[in-house]
Amino acid sequence: MVLYHFHVTQIQRSAGQSAIASAAYRAGEKLYSEYYGETSDYSHKKGVICSEILLPTNAPLEYADRQTLWNALEQAERNKDAQLAYSFDVALQNEFSLEENIALARQFVSEQLVSRGMIADFSIHKPDKEIQNPHFHILCPIRPLKENGKWGYKQRRVYHLDENGDRILDENGKATFDAVPTTDWGSPERLGSWREAWAALCNAKFEEKGLDCRIDHRSYERQGIDQIPTVHEGPAVRQMEAKGIPTDKGDLNRWIRSANAAIRSLRKKITMLLDWLKDVRRELSQPQQPNLGQLLGDYIAMRNAGAWSQKAKLGNLKQFVEAYNYIMENKLFTVEALTERVDFISGQVAALKAELDDSNKRQKELKDLLQQAENYARLKPVFDEMNSIRWKGQREKYRQEHERELRLFYMTRRKLKDVLTPDGKLPISAWQREMERLAREHEAAYAKYKPLRDDLTKLLQVRHHVNVALDQRGQPIIEQERQNDKRER
């Protein structure tokens, strides 16, 4: 899981802190403080992977030695409440290898700190496997170096001047001034740029490795995330929590995570509710179409208004009841539902009608073929008898006597020419079997077709009533009603 943690504090004597002790702890070394006359020994500290001091070009080379550097700074800071160093605490990413994390840390230190003239003492920490929290520390002297390598001033005086350019004096006769930092290292803007730069380095590495995860240097508030941030626990608290020992900070963070989960769940439900309300409001703002029951009622009311007899009115009422019961049984409540139902049933009726027409056509063809086969069987003996007469005169006389039968035989033979088998026979049995099959299929198809056709007739009747009512209201009628209604009915 990606993690963004970039925290900067100050090492201050007023808080009882020592630059030497801080450097010894972060580097895991044993260092002696000339200022306090005491030794800080952290040489047995575990989890320190590497430590290094990077110097700007104007720094004395001896400052590459940790004890020399921080003793020199302690001697330069004479105030008992002096601010000594900036302390960076930055989380590394578990998605990167140790070598990649070290390279990223060194790149950040070089590009963002050393390039600005800062001395950077940084150390990579990777605690035991029980706590996967790789991170690195940086200590940078607050006091800058001059071009000659000597310690410079942390602040300079900017005197208050009057309109004549003269210094303004206080009640004791001393010139008033503002103490202005000589560098921007401690400004909120610089801290923001460092935080952003570190996030950019990590995100570039994520992209290089083909990972979708990203980190964001902005606070939850600046990101627009309504979430409570957890408190920094530190290695000691993490070790205790890993061993099952509850801590105040651990309890607080557990409560914060639970509260954030509840907030996210509640926000999601609120968003869903607001979206639903928007949809409802949008739906209600649209002109509402009357339902089919209302339109049928309007139609019957118009019919009754022009009816001359009670019998006609009762007939109209009966028609309304039948149509109303039909739409209720089929759950047709809107014009759109009626249109969809008409289209669907029309499609089914058309498909079955085409199937029945094809069947009727083929049965007619088979019936004609069987009739022709019967004629062929009945008349062929006459033809054979004529061909058996050897004498031309007698054969001609026979032909004249049986001219009608022979003419019918020739016509029948022409029609059956393409269906005769190679041995001159007709597939009468196959035709009869096909006729029986088609008859069965026709009966089954018609059993489906008839109720659908009746259903379509009722639908078209309802659609006609609805269109009359819509036209009376001045609303668009159902498309294709005028041109198709007569044909469909």
Image: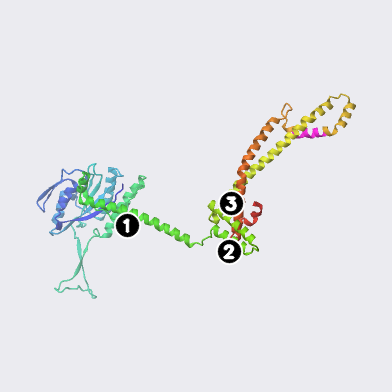
Label 1 sits on a secondary structure element that is: loop
Q: Earlier in the sequence, mark 3 or mark 2?
A: 3
Q: Which residues are magenta?
A: 407-416
**Residue drawn at point x = 43 percent, y = 59 percent:** 278
Q: Nearer the viewer, residue 213 or 284?
A: 284
**Rendered position, 325 above or below 475:** above
Q: Amino acid at mark 2?
A: Arg
How far apart, in angstroms, are the residues tagged by discs 1 and 2?
A: 52 Å
Q: How many marks?
A: 3
Q: Nearer the viewer, residue 327 or 236?
A: 327
Which residue reaches farthest front?
310
The residue identified by callout 1 is 226
Does residue 414 show up magenta in the picture? yes
Label 3 sits on a secondary structure element that is: helix
Q: Is residue 71 left or right of residue 104?
A: left
Q: Amino acid at mark 3?
A: Val
Discs 3, 2 touching: Cβ within 8 Å: no
How far apart, in angstroms, are the residues tagged by discs 3 and 2?
A: 22 Å
The residue identified by callout 2 is 473
Label 2 sits on a secondary structure element that is: helix
The residue identified by callout 3 is 342
Q: Amino acid at mark 1?
A: Asp
Q: Is residue 423 left or right of residue 67?
A: right
Mark 1, other Cα within 10 Å: few <14 / some 14–19 / many ≥20? few
Does residue 120 appear in this view?
no
**Residue drawn at point x = 21 percent, y = 74 percent:** 166
